[in-house]
Amino acid sequence: MQAIAESSPVKLLHGLMAILNAVGTAWIAIITVLISCDILGRVLFNSPIFGVPEFVKVSVVGIVWLQMSHTLKIGGHIRTDVILDRLPPRGRASIDLIASILGAFVFGLLVYAGWDNMIEAWRIGEFEGEHPARIPTYPIRSIVLLGAALTSFQFILLGWQSIRKFFWRAEKEDC
């Protein structure tokens, strides 16, 4: 796994994941300030900022997908280890491999199924909301597919890591 993790394409994609995660974090800060200003405008001046609910609605989807692959890479997703902790190393590696295969398949399927919709959204200039608070959704559709593709890629790497753990443990136990 060391050689794969240090290869240039993998480093490049992991760097992209980190950048997208940072963009998602900055986006969270922006909508936090925007929501706070909207609340202050409502309370103090009885005048909310126009389009904040629409912007936040679209933003949440974008933020999730900007950060999904990096969160998987660093092991930040919630996981229940009650059963895994009771298994031998090869059992854990086997379950991790199955989970990685399923994850790569599901997120890859999401990319495949969403591709035509994303192209169509760009073609028609898809928006959320009514005039004048119309928020473009076509970039968000692209972010969803990019995030899903990177997440699928990360699941493939985790699957490879599980295979290595399975056989490395077997060699170690034979000694």
Image (spheres, rainbow, N blue to C red):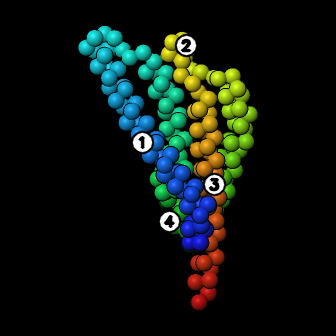
How packed mark 1 is, by other alpha carbons closer than 10 Å (few <14, some 14-19, many 20 or more), is some
Q: Quadrant of the C terminus?
A: bottom right
Marks 3/4: CA distance? 26 Å
- Residue at numbered disc 3: 153
- Residue type, mark 2 in image: Glu
- Residue at numbered disc 2: 130
Question: Which one is in front in this view, the residue at disc 3 or the one at disc 4?
Answer: 3
- Residue type, mark 3 in image: Phe
Compare residues 89 and 28 and report the one nearer the observer: 28
- Residue at numbered disc 1: 25
Residue contact at pointers 1 and 2, CB within 8 angstroms = no
- In terms of sequence position, does the residue under pointer 3 or pointer 2 come before the other? 2
- In terms of sequence position, does the residue under pointer 1 or pointer 2 come before the other? 1
Q: Is residue 171 left or right of residue 117?
A: left
- Give coordinates of residue 115: x percent, y percent: 71, 37
Where is residue 125, by image quadrant? top right
In the rendered image, the residue lying farthest to the top is 46
Residue 18 in view in this figure: yes
| SS assignment at label 4 | helix
- In terms of sequence position, does the residue under pointer 1 or pointer 3 come before the other? 1
In the rendered image, the residue lying farthest to the bottom is 175
- Residue at numbered disc 4: 85
- Residue type, mark 4 in image: Asp
